[in-house]
Amino acid sequence: MNFKEIEKKWQKKWEETNLYAFDPNSEKEKLYCLEMFSYPSGAKLHLGHWYNFGVTDTWARYKKMCGYNLFHPMGFDAFGLPAENYAIKTGIHPRISTEKNIDTMEHQLKVIGGSWDWNHEVVTCREEYYKWTQWMFLALYKHGLAYKKEAPVNWCPSCNTVLANEQVISGECERCGSTVIHKKMSQWFFKITDYAEELLQDLDNLDWPEKTKVLQRNWIGKSNGAYVNFKIKGFDDSFTVFTTRADTLFGATYCVLAPEHELVDKITTKEQREAVEAYKLEASKQSEIERTSTIKEKTGVFTGAYAINPVNNKEIPIWISDYVLASYGTGAIMAVPAHDERDYDFARKFGLDIIQVLEEETGDPHQNEQKKDSIVAIVYSKEKNKYLTLNWHEQGGRLFIGGTRKENESALECAKREIAEETGFTKLKLIRELPRINHHYYAYNKDKYYNIDSTGFYFELASETQTEKHLDADEKFDIEWVEQETIEREVKDALHYKTFEYALHDEAITADGLHINSEFLNGLNKEQALDKMYAWLEENKCGQKTTTYKLRDWLVSRQRYWGAPIPVVYCDKCGIVPVKEEDLPVVLPDDVEFTPDGESPLKKCESFMHTTCPNCGGPATREADTLDTFVCSSWYFLRYPDNHNDEKPFNKDIINKMLPVDKYVGGIEHACMHLLYARFFVKALRDMGYLSFDEPFKSLIHQGLILGPDGEKMSKSKGNTVSPDEYVEEYGSDVLRGYLMFGFNYTEGGPWTDDGIKAINRFYNRVVRIVRLISEENKQYEDLEVSMHKTIKAIRTDIEKFQFNTCMSRIMEYTNALSKYESIPRKYIETLILLLAPFAPHLSEELWAQIGNPYSVYNQSYPDYDEEKAADTEITIGVQINGKLRDEVKTAIDEGKDVILSKALSQEKVKKYTEGKEIIKTIVIPNKIVNIVVK
RNA sequence: GCUCUUGUGGCGGAAUUGGUAGACGCGCUGGACUCAAAAUCCAGUAGUAGCGAUACUGUGUGGGUCCGAGUCCCACCAAGAGCACCA
């Protein structure tokens, strides 16, 4: 059969008969199936489009055959940079190239044979659409959700435009990969942050892939903490920091402002001014990537000013450093070097104070504990590269030197005394005092529980000189120098081992612990201390509990030509004035010089710029920037159902009935852009009263990525692209679609192979041969009955899960079953064609006609199954002996356990394994397994 | 560095969610048809040992739970994705 020929024939017929037109008056339940619409870039569809559109279409067709009133529209996201860049290169106007591309893509989409209803098509660059995009802007503006402000923005020097935060991928432009720089500009923003909490909360109820939800959650970046106000010594000003660890406030030994912080100039002292200015200049020169590189060593400059720590009125120095970002929190931090890695690095480098306020806990607490202060001393010999340990053998294993502090003795004195008494060494060099540890233990010799506050010391042995030891009678140990490895193996005591770890790693303690050096927080854990500190801050009016989000407001201005003009005018008298709704659209003029020079191209179009103020009628100028194309795509799914409405963007009743989208299919790359923006739009429109649902996309699927044959992402530069066209040319559309469904796990994708597509070609030809074996004899074959019902059941289950590969293999199995017969009753053949219909649309329509059935196969119901017939009456299950599969046993379905067991035990092979052995236990799970445990 | 995802024959991939691992297909081997080839049909195909029945091994590595683990838990390794000085 010539697949290509029949495909053309049916595509034509489908179009002529309007087979896929949506009927709004149908009684059937609606089903809105949507693929993410595409950008009409090149003239051709690539494999990714086929994979997304073709395979999803199979699901849609299946649903249609299941009796749903399918709404399956298609359109084009037609504004955007590529057309404009193409125009700059070739001189062809974006409108012309875009419309031409749309035309060819529409033809190509028809080759896929999709069940799209083209009557509902939407093209975002046409006036009849962008009029309403502008309307959306005005609606948001009227409700305070669109505003203009001067702010540091991301600027792509190559695209010559600003970018939204979401379009900056690790410091680079999402589109062209250029390093993004920061500029201060006055730009339009949408207040998506107003919806941060709802956008986060509602994720829980969506049938979306978990990883996509995780991406959005991280992007929204909720963080609970507190604002704390710091007064500045000698000024009336104060500044606020955001912290998630307000409980560590007693450990704050300095503050850091972002170099851009507004107070920096004011508080910098004369002595420090020069250094501060130099540092600010240096910071401003750096790109985002350089600046936020975590590998970079910490830099910073003291301002000369001091802040007052509100909890203890201590004066702490104020520094500036680029590790504090102006864009997050308040642009200022309190530094707690003892418990924050970054603060620790900084404090170490600049010799700032480090105060420990959290003490890790080791051992198990007990009710009646006696408190003690003690030390653990670690002595290292550089010469030996070994550590000094005491081997107490059975009495306590291997330990370091430890001891209890005497009255009026400092911890350091105690450590030195203990070392001298127990080992005789006196010439020591202190490397570092180690953090304190709260340790619980039980002393056998004294039958007492202790809770000790232990301070660690890390010494280096300066000289081998030894004095006389002073040992108590019960102190029986050997002094041994051992290597690190031995310690790791043999030091079991938690306190001693932890102390050793502190010696080895000179870093902040980020683990949880109990508070020390913190007055009213002492002894409390993190949760208790946080609660108490929040209360204290609010009571003393120097801070409050708060929540921050990483999500920023969405910057929608673009200094480019090919987009929807922002419907706003500037009047000298009235200021910013929105264009009146009845004056929409603000038409994008065609004759514009759009060579990029960093200025908005529309600015150079006099006829566009000069207008009158809608308010006072005086002279005014138009906004020259256009809207981010993501604005266009944030509501297109709302336009589809009512795309011809020229009164409103959409009728409320219609979209309340048609939305949300039941199944949305597209790439995961839009997780934090389109998918987030669209959710925001729906929520905002809901609050304005234009619609009554909360979420645009109830259920979401991401197709995987089809890679080049080399397993790499397809790209022209790598020369590993595969064009769908040549395969359509050779095998036809159905075969290509079939392979895309059969050869991959849909959500994973994978490398393309030629071998796979040949297999589908072979299979479809086999189907054609089998259909020719149709017989009008009304016979029933038991094995075909079982196979048919099982197949239907399996396909219906798997297609719901977007598991097209297993669906295809089920149809193959059914085909294999049919091929055992030389003449096959009509009903089995009809079922085969119907089963195949969503998967191979053209072929199925053709075969359906060939066996003499009326057009169209898609007006038929998808085959249903009889649960009883789909179930086996007899089943073979495995018999395990001691968990190892040894035999199998045939049983009736749902057979009693006793019957199965006795049957299994009577089998020769089972006997062989059980003979002369004692049966300890038997597990019988009907229809699944028998396991006999013998000894 | 953090978070997430994925590791199953020569290959693409299955496995009713803890119950006979490798469905289906590709490839390969043998056979039928043919003067021959293609196409098609039939049989075999995880590895090792054995003529064979069979035995042992086997789902990235190492432990664990369980009568039973590809599936659950812990640690690690590798690949990919996202975030990245987020206070």
Image (cartoon, rainbow, N blue to C red):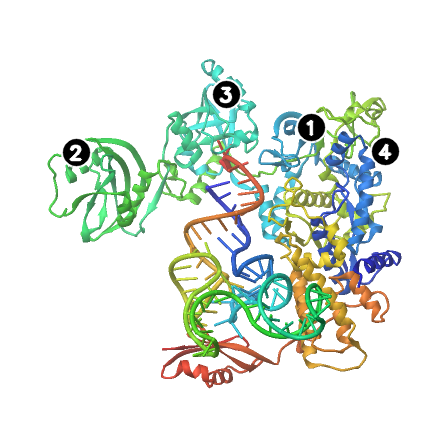
The secondary element bearing badge 4 is classed as helix
Q: Between label 4 and label 1, give the one nearer the viewer.
A: 1
B15 is higher (above) or lower (below) than A231: below
Q: Between label 4 and label 2, give the one nearer the viewer.
A: 2
User: Which residue is the site of mark 1?
Assistant: A160
* Mark 1 nearby-residue class (10 Å; few <14, some 14–19, many ≥20): some
Residue A662 image point, x, y percent = 71, 55
- Is residue A289 visible from the viewing direction of this image? yes
The secondary element bearing badge 3 is classed as helix
User: Which residue is the site of mark 3?
Assistant: A279
* CA distance separating discs 4 and 2: 93 Å
Give the residue type that dot 3 points to. Tyr
Q: Quadrant of residue A744?
A: bottom right
Residue at point 75%, 54% (across, down): A728
Q: Earlier in the sequence, mark 4 or mark 1?
A: 1
* CA distance separating discs 3 and 1: 28 Å
Front residue of A471/A462: it is: A462
Q: Chain of mark 1?
A: A
Q: Quadrant of residue B67?
A: bottom left
Q: Earlier in the sequence, mark 2 or mark 1?
A: 1
* CA distance separating discs 4 and 1: 30 Å
Q: Chain of mark 4?
A: A
Which residue ends up furthest to the top in the rendered image?
A: A270
User: Which residue is the site of mark 4?
Assistant: A583
